[in-house]
Image: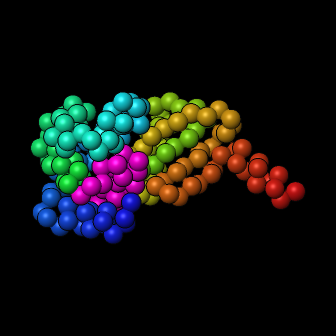
Amino acid sequence: MSSATVNDFFQAITSSGTSKDDLNIIYDSVQKFSEVTSKNKDVKVFLSNDIYPAESKIDVIKDVIGEKQQAINFFKTIIDFGILNDLIDSSEFFLKKIRSILSKVKVKVVVSSLNQRKEEIVRKGLEEIWGTDLEIDFFIDEDIIGGVILQVEDKFFDGSISGKLKQINNII
């Protein structure tokens, strides 16, 4: 993937008067698209194959993401730029770019157990640090014993008991 092409593309969609609401629609659509193409090999193969016309690919994409015109225009542009395969192979890169434009932050939270109260406390603490426009996914891993592991975009924070034990073990 040519980073200049991708960066030029994102420069174009953000400076062309695209509203924040439209970008949110595009973001949600790329997320749906990514989920389907990562789970459904037939869809991925069809969309990746250059023998199929753009119109047929758009029809399949509409089946995946729905009929939101902003998103359809986005995918038409992706196809016109010739970077549909890049989107399929690197959707998280594209989602990260759009999150950056929208000032959203993706957070993966790993805890040993979870209830509604704990989720609320963690969510509130994260919002105090990174703001309220967070995309938070919670995961349970009993092996961490206690504490929390966070992945905030590309940054990793291990505040788990098992992580602290590993640190101590490495010192000894």
Whether residue 119 sits left or right of residue 15 in the image: it is right
Image quarter (top left, top right, bottom left or bottom right) of the N terminus: bottom left
Magenta-drawn stretch, dominant element (helix, strand or loop):
helix
Q: Position of residue 26 (x, y in %)?
A: 23, 48
x and y percentages locating residue 128 in the rendered image: 42, 55
Percent position (x, y) of residue 139?
Answer: 52, 36
Specify the quadrant that holds the C terminus.
bottom right
Residue 52 place in picture, x, y as percent: 24, 39
- Residue at 20% over, 54% down: 80
Residue 97 versus residue 76 in the image, above or below: below
* Residue 91 falls inside the magenta stretch: yes
Foreground of the two, 137 or 18:
18
Q: How many marks?
A: 0
Residue at 77% across, 48% down: 165
**In this rendering, does residue 21 appear at all?**
no
Front residue of 23/90: it is: 90
In front of the other: 29 or 61 = 61
Q: Residue at x 58, y 38 (%)?
A: 111
Region in magenta: 81-102
* The image quarter in which residue 40 lies: top left
Is residue 18 at least partly visible in the picture?
A: yes
